[in-house]
Image (spheres, rainbow, N blue to C red):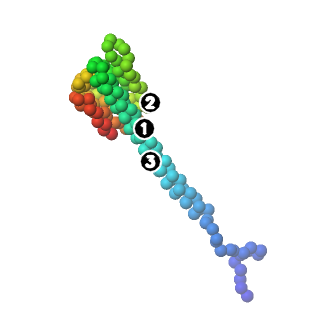
Amino acid sequence: MTQSTSPPGFEFKTARGFSLVETLIATALMALVVSGGVLYLTSIRRHTRLLNETDAFRLFLERVYAHTCSYQEIIRIDLSEYSATAVRGANEILLTHNFHRGFSLRFEPGQSRQLFIYPSLSSSPATLHIQGGEEECSIVMSLRSRYRVEC
């Protein structure tokens, strides 16, 4: 005579799937991996937007310099936190660059907010800092109006 440890009418079956605890642990691990990937992709996206904004401003400076060389004029660039305006003559606006939302120029203490571009060279070497959130890129201008981007 064999004794049954199960109540009458019930039989124990062997497990054929995952238990609830195993499923919850696997789901939690997958959520952790996905959230880390989303954070990484968000930071890459933010950095790429900053690079694009810096490159657009560099192109603005190169267009101003090209105009200066073509027409042999002195161009003044008025800088503010959120825009740059190229002015020729008395106050004729030539070009304007507005930074997208979330980006701005950062100025060093005592740094001039005007930049003069001459047909042969810029007024002086300058470093312009573009901020996007916590990250920053710089455009370094040399005497010969060559521009280098550093991030």
Horizontal arrangement in the rendering, residue 20 relative to residue 117 (left or right): right
Q: Are marks 2 and 1 in contact (CB under 8 Å)?
A: yes
Quarter residue 27 falls in:
bottom right
The residue to which callout 2 is attached is 100
Rendering coords of residue 90 (x, y %): 32, 11
Which residue sits furthest bottom?
Answer: 1
Mark 3, residue position = 40
Other residues around mark 2 within 10 Å, as few (<14) / some (14–19) / many (≥20): few
Q: Amino acid at mark 2?
A: His
List the single residue furthest toward the front: 70
Residue 60 in the image: state x and y as whole percent: 36, 28
- The amino acid type of the residue labelled 1 equals Arg
Alpha carbon separation for disc pair 3 and 1: 14 Å
Q: Residue at x 31, y 37 (%)?
A: 149
10 Å crowding of disc 3: few (<14), some (14-19), many (20+): few
Disc 2, SS: loop
User: Considering the image in quadrants, where does the N terminus appear?
Assistant: bottom right
State whether residue 41 appears in this view.
yes
Is 112 positioned to the left or the right of 102 in the image? left
Q: Nearer the viewer, residue 14 or 126?
A: 126
In the picture of the structure, the residue carrying the numbered disc 1 is 49
Question: For the C terminus, which image quadrant?
Answer: top left
